[in-house]
Amino acid sequence: MEFTAKQIAQFIQGRVEGDENASINTFAKIEEGVPGAISFLSNPKYIQYIYDTKSSVVLIDESLNLEKPVTTTLIRVKDSRDSVAKLLQLYAAAVNPPKQGIADNAYISPKAKIGKDVYIGPFAVISDGVEIGDGCQIYPHAVIGENTKLGNKCIIYPNVTIYHNCKLGNNVILHAGCVIGADGFGFAPNPEANRYDKIPQIGIVTIEDDVEIGANTCVDRSTMGSTYIRKGVKLDNLVQIAHNDDIGENTVMSAQVGIAGSTKVGQWCMFGGQVGIAGHITIGNKVFLGAQSGAPGSIKDNQSLIGTPPMEKIPYFKAHALLNKLPDMYKEIHSLQKEIEELKKNQK
């Protein structure tokens, strides 16, 4: 498929600078551009590549100023990253249209309810009482446990396991290998019997609309009630959400984040990779935590923090800059202590 710069600009409401008939048929990073490709530029750190890129068209933020002319055709937009996301969605839908049909070797319980235009791949298992909404895509080897309900247009990739009684909204995407509704980590110590007694996890997981969960991520069922993943949440690969957590709308988490049990996370939070959150605390709205931060206690709204315990970024980086000087500072202090001792002796 080929599109012109003019057609693309109309679709994303941009403004063409250059040849509006320039045609593109693929995507490329700006530093790896080739003729016929469209690239984007939003980060000023990459601005040097726009002068030499071979891409035929480049999406560029309106706010970026260029120091010299370019040979490529530009499309000016408010947010080039958002615009390229829309184009990629359009491209993905065209080259990978939704599958339909039910494989002969899929297992579907006669007690399950299957909506219209649903795809169920080979060796998928749809258990008793399951309800699957219209347009869902269930890929091979996925397992949907008893009485679980899926909304419309969900995508369940290979080897996903959804345990019994869980509830998924519309447009939920679960990537390969993720597990929804496994038991929460609940054990009571029993010293008399020299063991831990398992605490049955009788709750469920509720995932609201427009949630995307990455490969091999786990969301545990609650002890009682429900673990909640609210509307618009995006979880990366290898994230752990423990029992009875409540993750607020539009919050995003990078890989290897771990949230301990019974913690409430607010809306529009952003957690970098390997962030750890203690249990039974509250994280406010719009809290941004840098990679490898650890939060042992509750955090109020509208904060951008890093470290363990989390602190504001400038004091954090200043403190870490001093760490390299600590050995020399120790030597100086030790030397000063000796001098003070000598002065005390001489005064006697």
Image (cartoon, rainbow, N blue to C red):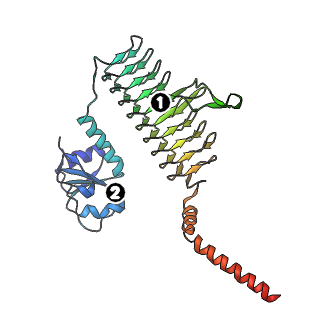
Is the Cβ of the residue at disc 1 closer than 8 Å to that at disc 2? no
Q: Secondary structure at mark 2?
A: loop
Q: Decide if residue 267 is in sight here.
A: no
Rendered view: 69 above or below 331: above
Q: Is residue 34 above or below residue 256?
A: below
Q: CA distance from mark 1 to mark 2?
A: 42 Å
Q: Residues within 10 Å of mark 2 (few under 14, many from 20)?
A: some
Q: Is residue 152 left or right of residue 100?
A: right
Left or right for 3, reference 133 = left
Residue 39 rendering spot, x and y as whole percentages:
26, 52
Q: Residue at x 47, y 30 (%)?
A: 180
What secondary structure is found at the residue carrying circle 1?
Answer: strand
Expressed as whole percent of the image width and height from the top left, the position of residue 205 reads: 52, 28
Total marks shown come to: 2
Res 310 quadrant in image: bottom right
- Figure quadrant of the N terminus: top left
Quadrant placement of the C terminus: bottom right
Up/down of 111 relative to 65, above or below:
above
* Viewer-side residue, 282 vs 89: 282
Q: Nearer the viewer, residue 176 or 189?
A: 189
Residue found 81% across the figure and 88% down from its top: 347
Q: Position of residue 298 (x, y in %)?
A: 63, 46
Residue 62 bears which disc, if any?
2
Mark closer to the chain start, 1 or 2: 2
Badge 2 amino acid = Glu
**Image point (18%, 55%), residue name:** 19
Q: Kindly identify which residue carries mark 1.
A: 180
Percent position of residue 87, x then y:
29, 43
Does residue 52 appear to the left or right of 311 in the view shown?
Answer: left
Q: Nearer the viewer, residue 95 or 178?
A: 178
Q: Relative to residue 252, is residue 330 drawn left or right? A: right
For label 1, the crowd category at 10 Å Cα-Cα, with few meaning under 14, some 14 to 19 and many 20 or more, is many
